[in-house]
Amino acid sequence: MHTTLRGRGAEVVIGPDRPFCVIGERINPTGRKRFAELLRAGDLSRVEQDVREQAAATMLDVNMGVPLADEAELLTRAVRMIQDLTDQPLCVDSSVVEALEAALAVYDGKALVNSVTAEDERLHQILPLVKRHGAAVIGLPNDEDEIPEDPHRRLELARKIVDVATGTYGIPPEDVLIDPLAMPVGADTTLTLKTLETIALIKAELGVNMTLGASNVSFGMPDRPAIGSAFLPMAMAYGLTSAIMDARNPQLVQAVRAADLLLGNDPWGGAWIAAFRSRESAT
């Protein structure tokens, strides 16, 4: 199953037989006090640097969620600005329906919406926007009652999201990506195995593409890149096809590209060899 996304001048295809889709996470004020202050003042100047620093990304996540700011206005401005800087597709990231609607209205191409949960109210607020704007969407398998630990319950909620998206709103199944929920290994060392089991279940029973916030796995732990660069190839082998991750970190990006090579998604090692030669020529 292939999910096709488009920016102003570039197309990205996500699928189990395609190179892993690296979605750059950096354009987000969470944990960035100075960036949040700039956004609150309406200053988007830092965004241009964030775009440049994520050159290794396949596409970019854009989040403007700052308290006491007009998120719809900020997200709309950011989408326009970033599309002037890069042809890459964007993942439009907001929990505010009005902000998503405003940003999708100015987006040039086919965006990925981040995200919708399995809560009935959220499904019927966000999925009509996704359909109207011809976008794709990330589904989170949690609902009003819980963020489930049981992989089979996550699968059940993922199936609900896919069923409502396809059956009620006519969104193609390839345009629904499921997030299997990556939880911090520092909180419970069994949680990563549950994420991997969820990935395997979704791949086997739903066959849709998947993404997740890779940085969540190492949250609160030392040497986070080492954990991420071990986790991502494992998740790819189970069926993960994309991740929102730190595209600035060479260790993480190289781990993903090495996994592409080993999983047969880099024919003849062309991308791996080209990247190596590029690094060599830069030194």
Image (tube, rainbow, N blue to C red):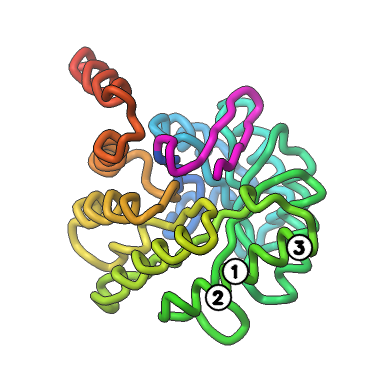
At horizontal 46% and vertical 37% (from top left) the residue drawn is 50
Q: Position of residue 253 (x, y in %)?
A: 30, 39
* Residue picked out by circle 2: 156
| CB atoms of marks 3 and 1 within 8 Å | no
Q: Which numbered disc flags the more N-terminal residue, 3 or 2?
A: 2
Q: Nearest the camera: 108 or 271?
A: 271
* Quadrant housing residue 196: bottom left
Instruction: Identify the element where label 1 is drawn.
Output: helix
Residue 52 versus residue 234 in the image, above or below: above
* Residue picked out by circle 3: 167
At horizontal 28% and vertical 18% (from top left) the residue drawn is 274
* Residue picked out by circle 1: 159
Give the CA separation, mark 2 to mark 1.
Answer: 5 Å
Q: Residues within 10 Å of mark 3 (few under 14, many from 20)?
A: few
Give the CA separation, mark 3 to mark 2.
Answer: 16 Å
Q: Is residue 37 left or right of residue 150?
A: right
Give the CA separation, mark 3 to mark 1.
Answer: 11 Å
| CB atoms of marks 2 and 1 within 8 Å | yes
